[in-house]
Amino acid sequence: MKDLIIQYRYALADLRRKDKELKEEQNHYENLRVEEESKRKISDGQDLAAIVDYIAEIKAERSKYSSMISDKMFEIEWMEKGRRPGSMRGAGNLAAYQREISIDPNRFLHMQDIQFESKTDEEIKILEDKVLDLLWFLTKKEREVYMMANGYGHTVEQIAEYTSMASGTVSSLLDRARKKIRKNIKKEDFYM
């Protein structure tokens, strides 16, 4: 894909170069037209009409190049970002129903058999410090909502009632906090 993007960039550069040449040619003929009009040495007006026609052809040609340049830029942006320019959701960001992973409930029947190793006070203190470091990235409201939801097990509606916020606000704060934590967490720090 990178090779294709490079080829498109070269094509874009060629189109821009050609458009620049046409612009210079158009400016040259515009100046000629102005000179011809100022001299008034036109016998029957054929020279001036030819210049005006040629300028119109150049403008039409430049219009085509301008459209091709914008198309190339659109295509390059699409290839680089992996999504349609202007679209809010990229190829990597799936809808909620696409992120769901089906799990067999029978897998959880044997969870009682697993014995968890107990940690020493020193290990617990280290883990607590790491959790506090993670929560440091959150704003005060995000930390409050995150602790109420994950630390105390309250639902979004309960948190909204306690904090006098709308449930949508609580939900967005909770999502934002989870994203920040997911971004900053290092799993190897929590598995000793």
Image (cartoon, rainbow, N blue to C red):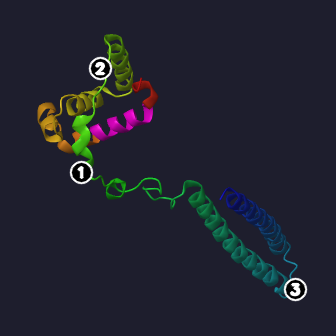
The x, y position of residue 104, in whole percent, is: 27, 53
Q: Is residue 170 above or below residue 136?
A: below
Residue identifier under label 2: 118
User: Helix, strand, or loop for circle 3?
Assistant: loop
Taking the spot 28% from the left edge, 38% from the top edge, the residue there is 174
Q: Which of 28 and 109 is in front in this view?
A: 109
Residue type of the residue flagged with mark 1: Pro
Is the Cβ of the residue at disc 2 closer than 8 Å to that at disc 3?
no
- Element type where label 2 sits in the image: loop
Local crowd size for mark 3, using a 10 Å CA cut-off: few (<14), some (14–19), many (≥20): few
Mark 1, residue position? 105
Q: In which quarter of the image is residue 3?
A: bottom right
Residue 91 spot, x, y in % from top left:
47, 57
**Magenta-colored stretch includes residue 178:** yes
Instruction: Identify the residue under disc 3.
Output: 43
Q: Residue 50's spot in the image, x, y percent?
A: 81, 83
Distance Cα–Cα, label 1 vs label 2? 27 Å
Amino acid at pointer 3: Ser
Q: Residue sitting at 84 percent across and 74 percent down?
A: 36
Q: Residue at x 18, y 33 (%)?
A: 153
Residue 30 horizontal/vertical position (percent): 78, 70
In the image, 119 versus 178, the foreground residue is 119
- Toward the front, the furthest residue is 113
Mark 2: few, some, or many residues within 10 Å (few <14, many ≥20)? few
Position of residue 117 relative to residue 69, above or below, is above
Bounds of the magenta span?
A: 173-185
Which quadrant, please, contains the C terminus? top left
- In terms of secondary structure, where does tag 1 sit? helix
N-terminal label among 1 and 2: 1
Would you say residue 109 is visible in this rendering? yes
